[in-house]
Amino acid sequence: MTTKYGYSFIDLRADYLRAFVGVIICLAPYVFGAETRGAVLVLLICAVLFAVYGLRTTLRHMAKIMLDENAITMKIFTNRIIPFDKLSDLSLSYFSTWRSGGKGWMQLRLRGAGKTMRIESNISGFESIVRQAVSAASAGNLTMTSSTIRNIAALNIDTSNIRQAA
């Protein structure tokens, strides 16, 4: 049975808003004819960076993740498939936006069959995706770092079958 997951607009709206507001603020002096050319050039470069961020958010919004018992597939324009028996690396990273460690997000990185996938925690069903990937990694005897194991445990996923890297 194939299960499908995707990023909803609700989960990405803050990223879309950041990109939009960033582009508008950076282009405003240029539109209103600011005279300081050096600053305008820096702001134009920043506007391009915000636009790239918006494009990246749009691509994430278009991404569909499909999971079955044999593989994980990410489809944006083409299918990127990693069969679970070819999984060579799994890492789960936590990125905090606050010094206290709260209010952050996780990113699952999978490698195998010459491909890499990065899946962020604001996708619907993130814990299910991690659970199935961890199960496949454990079956394949992959070793994981202590920080990855800690992050997996934080999602209330059993880590007893995971081999820790030395």
Image: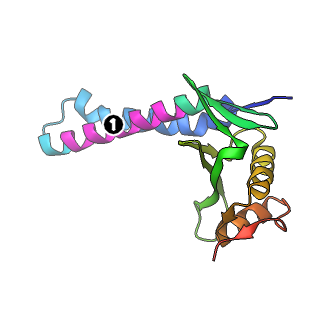
- In reply to whether residue 49 is colored magenta, the answer given is yes
Q: Amino acid at mark 1?
A: Ala
Q: Position of residue 118 (x, y in %)?
A: 59, 45
Residue 25 seen from this side = yes
Q: Nearer the viewer, residue 54 or 83?
A: 83
Residue 107 seen from this side = no
Q: Secondary structure at mark 1?
A: helix
Residue lying at 80% horizontally and 34% vertically, measured from the top left = 68
Residue lying at 61% horizontally and 34% vertically, measured from the top left = 13
The residue singled out by tag 1 in the image is 47
Q: Quadrant of the N terminus?
A: top right
Q: Quadrant of the C terminus?
A: bottom right
Examine the image and state in which quarter residue 38 appears.
Answer: top left
Q: Which contiguous range is marked in magenta? A: 40-57
Above/below status of 58 relative to 114: above
Q: Residues within 10 Å of mark 1 (few under 14, many from 20)?
A: many
- Residue at far top of view: 77
Q: Position of residue 106 (x, y in %)?
A: 65, 54
